[in-house]
Image (tube, helix red, strand yellow):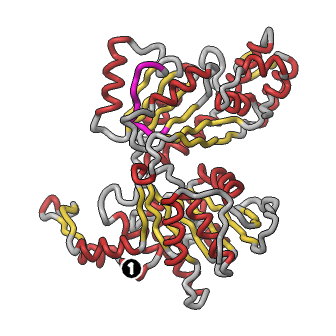
Amino acid sequence: MKYKPRTKPFRHQSRATLKAVRRRNLAVFFEPRLGKTKVALDWAAILAIKGEVQRVAVFAPSIALDVWQRQLRLHYPLSYEVEDFDYVYPPVVRNGNHARTKFFLAGREETFRATRPHVNLERPKQRAIEEWGPDAIVLDESHQYKRPGGRGAQDAWRLVRRLRKDNGGSGRPYVLLLTGTPDPKGWRDLFAQFRIMDETLLGTNAGSFDERFVIRGVGRRRWQIIRYQNLRRLRRIVSENSITCTAKQAGLEGKLFWQVLPVNLPQKVKDQYDTLAEEYIVETDAGVLDAANQGVLRLRLLQLTSGFLTGGKQIHESKITVLRAYAQNLRDQDESVVVSCRFTAEVDAAREVMAGLGFHTQVLDGRTKRRDRGHILDSFQSSRRSPQALVMQHQAGSLSIELTRAAELVFLTLPDDWVAFWQVLNRLRGPNQGRPVRVSAIVATGTVDRRVLYGLQRKEDWHYDLMNSPERFLRGRV
């Protein structure tokens, strides 16, 4: 069988796909931004062509489900359908392919949430997955299932066990684990993940695993792991059933990768946006917004999408909610991050979010005193506290600084100036950056946000485009 991928893989992706197809169950331990999702989709497509897989369930953080939709459209070579707990999407047909695959995209948070309407816990979303009957399961960000006693780890393991039992020993559903941080605190973090993938590898009981591989202290240190034993056997099991890759091995140090984190504005705010775009004036709960010309109108519309008006009044928190969900995922991965903002009120809101999630958070904006600036930057780069978050305004963080400790950059609202935009990107790159850099733009759908990003990526003159076609520009049409 000759498989023709829809997009050309990197060499490390090809190796991972081949090993996953041969073993059926595999843990893909790539550093962040090395393309784990494409490996999973090529794995599923090859098994679909072989007739082994027709239904694939993807368990991912809810914030990542839109990314999976985009990655499917980009990378999956066969005809497919997608559904989630609320909606069945129109099918995507690829000419010339004979196979059709069904994908179920399930948010980890809602799937592994239990309710107690009566006496016993009920898990309706897991029951829906069982009734759907997947032939393959992808656990994205599988490190979130590392606690053996956690509800997600327990429920995912038992769900896979029940499905395999129902399939009469066929070995299905096959399970693919995807994570960039498999064992931040040692080998024991792999036990629960491997138990979901294949319970015969490391067993099902955490106590038995500890007896074989873990040595703990005594007295006050009796709960602390001081070292591991039988490491040759443990490494052999892990090596045979996983594949790893670093950015250096893949040759992707410092490369830029882009993603859009879409936001749907509240309907009331979207109506205000449309009214302002058409009439140059609108009344909001925080007062009247008006614009004397198209340039000012663009600024007012950006304020509406950000959620903060002049003076710092907040009218919605849609972007802040998305930032919180995405940053929580980064916090779980112990990833430091730079959050770049346009408005001062955004800086304050983002600082509160990042600090609340447990990041060691610092701020760099127009209010930062010159004598404090160097200390903040040195602390971000060299502090032992992890993870770090630097919340900055575009203008304050675009020149003469290095932020290579982070490989994650989030734009809460994009800048006007292409030079400032490009300078902010390059603060995270350079000879000291050993990892790919992911740039995430939080973009309100159907608004000027989309058009600003499109123009900045292509080094366009936004003012010319605005004056040339105001309606197209302000409604986010590219």
Count the marks. Answer: 1
In the image: residue 101, left or right of residue 415: right
Task: Specify the quadrant that holds the C terminus.
Answer: top right
Instruction: Give the extent of the magenta segment.
Output: 399-408
In the image: residue 433, left or right of residue 5: left
Is 213 included in the stretch rendered in magenta?
no
The answer to whether any part of residue 379 appears in the image is yes
Is 407 included in the stretch rendered in magenta?
yes
Vertical placement of residue 393 versus 323, above or below: above
Mark 1: give few (<14), some (14-19) or many (20+) Cα within 10 Å.
Answer: some
Quadrant of res 71: bottom right
> Residue 125: image x %, image y %?
64, 67
The residue most toward the left is 219
Residue closer to the observer: 243 or 397: 243
What residue is at 51 percent from the left and 21 percent from the top?
393
What residue is at 54 percent from the left and 44 percent from the top?
326
Q: Main secondary structure of the magenta part?
A: loop
> Residue 423: image x %, image y %?
51, 24
> Residue 438: image x %, image y %?
52, 41
Element class at badge 1: helix
Vertical placement of residue 241 versus 284, above or below: below
Quadrant of res 48: bottom right
The answer to whether any part of residue 268 appears in the image is no
Task: Specify the quadrant that holds the N terminus.
Answer: bottom right
Quadrant of res 259: top right
Find disc 1 in the rendering and name its residue: 201
What residue is at 65 percent from the left and 74 percent from the top?
2
Residue closer to the observer: 30 or 337: 30
What residue is at 43 percent from the left and 74 percent from the top?
195
> Residue 368: image x %, image y %?
41, 15
The residue most toward the top is 292
- Disc 1 residue type? Leu
